[in-house]
Amino acid sequence: LRVVLTTPGLFPGGWKLPGLDADGLWHYPGGRARLVAAAVPRGQVVSGWDLAQQRPKPAQRAAPAGAVYWLEGLEGGLDPLRKLAESGLWGLTPENEDPARRAEGFNRFAIANA
């Protein structure tokens, strides 16, 4: 299967999916799969203006929308992955949580057949 970013991904490991270990296994609530390939264009920088605090938001590097991750050996079935797709790639690691950026719609993805 493929994971396709539909919005920019703000990941602690740069282009790497949050929850990806050193052996290439991607762990998410209720399942895991092996990352076999990725097509990630050059990273982009996202920033913005915080209206509530009247200051610029910090610039962050992001994996661009359209990045594709090919996975195989899916364990746990598609239901946990579908549930994750509804909420986005957030909270998979302690440093992968940003309520403001989550509300802005970052880290969203779609599931596609390989």
Image (cartoon, rainbow, N blue to C red):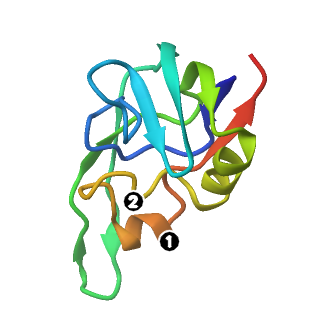
Name the residue furthest bottom. Answer: 52
Quadrant, the N terminus: top right
Element under disc 1 = helix
Q: Quadrant of residue 16?
A: top left
Name the residue furthest front. Answer: 76
Element under disc 2 = loop
**Amino acid found under the numbered disc labelled 2:** Gly
- Picture coordinates of residue 82, whole percent (x, y): 71, 49
- The reply, left or right, for residue 2 in relation to residue 48 is right
**Amino acid found under the numbered disc labelled 1:** Ala
Q: How many marks?
A: 2
Earlier-in-chain disc, 1 versus 2:
2
In the picture, the disc for residue 91 is 2
Q: Residue at 54%, 61% (x, y): give it.
A: 105
Residue at the disc numbered 1: 103
Q: Nearer the viewer, residue 12 or 6?
A: 12
Q: Residue at 41%, 25% (x, y): give it.
A: 25
Q: Residue at 35%, 83% (x, y): give it.
A: 51
- Picture coordinates of residue 41, whole percent (x, y): 45, 20
Nearer the observer: mark 1 or 2; the answer is: 2
